[in-house]
Each structure stands twice: as C-alpha cells, then as structure tokens.
Amino acid sequence: MSIIKEATFMGSFVREDKCPVDTKPEYAFIGRSNVGKSSLINMLTNKKGLAKVSQTPGKTQTINYFLIDNSWYMVDLPGLGYARISQSKRADWEKMIYYFLKNRKNLQYVFVLIDSMIPPQKRDMEFLMWLGTNHIPFVIVYTKTDRLLSKDLKKNIQNIQNEILINWNELPIEFITSAEKKRGNVEVIEFITQMNDSYYANLKNS
Ligand code: GDP
C-alpha cells in the first residue's frame, strides 16, 4: 500500500522509557531544525496539521508518536543541532535522542532528513557517522527538492553524496522529496510497507 489511510497522534514523550511499548515496528524521522520534517510528516500522512510546521525553533523537545494504519509508528524526533538554545540544554536534549536511538527495540530505520538546498553540513555527516558506529540502520531523505532548478539540485545532492562517500563505501538508500510538490511520498511509504511486511513475517516465525 503506498498511501497512508489513517494517522493518529499517540502522544509526546520526554524519554524513551515513557514511549509506547508494543510490538509495532517504528520508523524515526530526524534532521536539523528547519529541514522540513514537519512538512514531510504532514505530506506523508496527508494530514496538514499533524506535525506543527515552523513551531518556535528549538521548542519541540519531545518525541512525538503517530500510529499509522494501526500497523506501525512514525516517530517524530526533536530537531538536531539548533543553535539558539543553550549549550547545556542542547546537550541534554541530544543525549535523550541518542539514548532513544540506541535503545529502542522496535526501531527499524532512522529517516535522516537532509536539506537539498544547502551545501553538505558537518553536523549531518557527524550524525550519519554516529548512526553507523552504533549499527543503527538509516536512509536519507532529501527535502525541499522543489526549491532548486533540477541541474542545481543534482549538483548539490552530488556534493552531499561525495561528502558521505568520504566515510562510507556506498551510499545509503535515498529518497528525493518535496512536501510542496508532494514528491517522494509513494517511494517512502512503499519502502516502509516492505520493511513492515518482513518485520511481521519474522515476528510470525519467531
Ligand atoms: P522542521 O523545523 O524541520 O519541522 O521544518 P518545517 O516543516 O517547519 O519547514 C521549515 C520551512 O521550510 C517552512 O517554512 C516550510 O514551509 C519550508 N518547507 C518545508 N518543506 C518544504 C518543501 O518541500 N518545499 C518548500 N519549498 N518549502 C518547504
């Protein structure tokens, strides 16, 4: 199935051990503040107000859970690396995110959102390295791909890929998306559906 029929907000949590516990597979969405995460979540779920677009930056420090079609959880993680909050607050917050990612049992993939409009960011590259070091599976989602002419977009994505290939032997799975133009939603949902199928098949056999 390549569209989401039902998305229900399940709550906001401040710690991993407060998050829902059941056997559904989970997919986390994360990126630097302003990367377009809320817009992407709303686009994928077809619900305009599900995730709040452009909230006061740095304010959303909660892990937000959405139950999708009663079969999986979309997890909206707080934006990484926002400069306008204090260093110590940021450190606490990032610790919370890292703890979540390392310890969440049913986490299948992390969707790392990267802004396709801007040059490769050190912070994004460091985060990918951290995921790799901790053996956490991830894919990349390029956001806002409607904002550049296609040749400029191609060039910028290539620059980001080259930066990734400095540390990695191969590129991860990537999705080209635009919330504005509704681009890439079918591919993202199809990928998740496939992963869910094998998750539930394994669960049945175990
Ligand atoms: P978040 O902070 O990561 O949740 O980012 P938001 O979803 O709030 O988006 C940040 C800004 O980028 C907002 O002004 C959005 O309207 C804009 N934006 C997000 N996605 C897109 C997109 O696909 N295309 C364009 N043109 N703008 C986008």
Image (cartoon, rainbow, N blue to C red):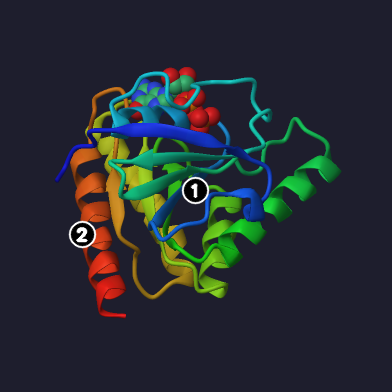
Residue pictured at 18% horizontal, 41% vertical: 186
Q: Work out whether 117 lies above or below 147.
A: below
The answer to whether residue 6 shows anywhere in this view is yes
Residue 121 percent across, percent down from the top left: 55, 47
Ligand 1 closer than 8 Å to label 2 CB: no
> Is 37 situated left or right of 129 in this image?
left
Q: Is mark 1 within 8 Å of ligand 1?
A: no
Q: Residue type at mark 2?
A: Gln
Q: Earlier in the sequence, mark 2 or mark 1?
A: 1
Looking at the image, which residue is at 40% across and 51% down? 159
| Front one among 33 and 45 | 45
Frontmost residue, 56 versus 202: 202
Q: Which residue is labeled 1 in the image? A: 120
User: Which amino acid lies under the numbered mark 1 shown in the image of this protein?
Assistant: Pro
Q: What residue is pinned by disc 2?
A: 194
Residue 184 visible in the shown view: no
The image quadrant that residue 88 belongs to is top right
Q: CA distance from mark 2 to mark 1?
A: 30 Å
Q: Which mark is residue 31?
A: none
The location of residue 58, given as percent across then percent down, is 68, 30
Q: From the viewer's perspective, is 87 left or right of 172?
A: right
Secondary structure of the residue carrying tag 1 is: loop
